Amino acid sequence: MAESPISNSKRYCARQVLSLGNDILPEYKLQSPRIGKWTILHYSPFKAVWDWVILLLVLYTAIFTPYVAAFVLSDPDYNSRKNKKYSDDPIVIIDFIVDVTFIVDIIINFRTTFVNSNDEVVSHPGKIAVHYLKGWFIIDLVAAIPFDLFLVGSHTDEVSFVARSTFSENLLSRLNL
């Protein structure tokens, strides 16, 4: 049985879209820009995976910060656990890893290319740094500061809650993925 010309054209269109041929990709992805040794292309597979990792860590922060504030800090047993070493609590260790990852993300953003208003990939490190400083740097920096590490010696739950409530700032800054 012969297929209709309409189903053939649909199949052809689907193959074109899925193949991401030269007519679908943006112009800058077809060029091979000159990049330095430590520069990361914003559309590279590494950057795509990194952005997913950051997104997952932001979701972790958005879920566990309210959980810790609502259930862990209000637990009657919390004061006895608080007297243990700071590094004995698994949540603290995970939060430390998340904080370090957010700081590494700032460093990576200083080395990641971007597309300017002329649809050109900018790979010059100085221009990348200025672009990031003018954009999301302050928000990322405030969101990445591990306030809870600065307040290890303080014994107030309110300070601990405020210190750990930077998740909203993390969430806002990471929506720019």
Image (spheres, helix red, strand yellow):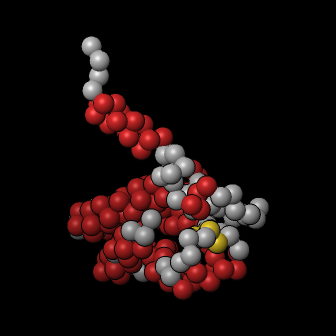
Can you say which quadrant of the picture contains the N terminus?
Answer: top left
**Quarter occupied by residue 116:** bottom right
Answer yes or no: is residue 160 visible.
no
**Quarter occupied by residue 61:** bottom left
Answer yes or no: is residue 79 visible.
yes
Question: Residue 101 at x, y = what percent?
Answer: 54, 62
List the single residue furthest toward the right. Answer: 37
**Quarter occupied by residue 125:** bottom right
Q: Nearer the viewer, residue 20 or 23?
A: 23
Question: Residue 160 at x, y = what percent?
Answer: 36, 76
Q: Is residue 159 above or below residue 52?
A: below
Can you say which quadrant of the picture contains the C terminus?
Answer: bottom left
Q: Nearer the viewer, residue 83 or 141?
A: 141
**Left or right: residue 22 compared with residue 76:** right
Q: Is residue 152 above or below residue 43?
A: below
Q: Nearer the viewer, residue 61 or 15?
A: 15
**Left or right: residue 20 compared with residue 63:** right
**Left or right: residue 119 compared with residue 169:** right
Question: Residue 104 at x, y = what percent?
Answer: 59, 66
Question: Residue 2 at x, y = what percent?
Answer: 29, 18
**Left or right: residue 25 compared with residue 65:** right
Task: Look at 50% across and 82% down and name the residue there.
Answer: 135
Task: Look at 68% across and 70% down and name the residue there.
Answer: 123
List the single residue furthest toward the top. Answer: 1
Task: Look at 32% across and 36% down and name the residue there.
Answer: 10
Task: Look at 39% across and 36% down and name the residue there.
Answer: 12
Q: How many marks?
A: 0
Q: Nearer the viewer, residue 153 or 94?
A: 94
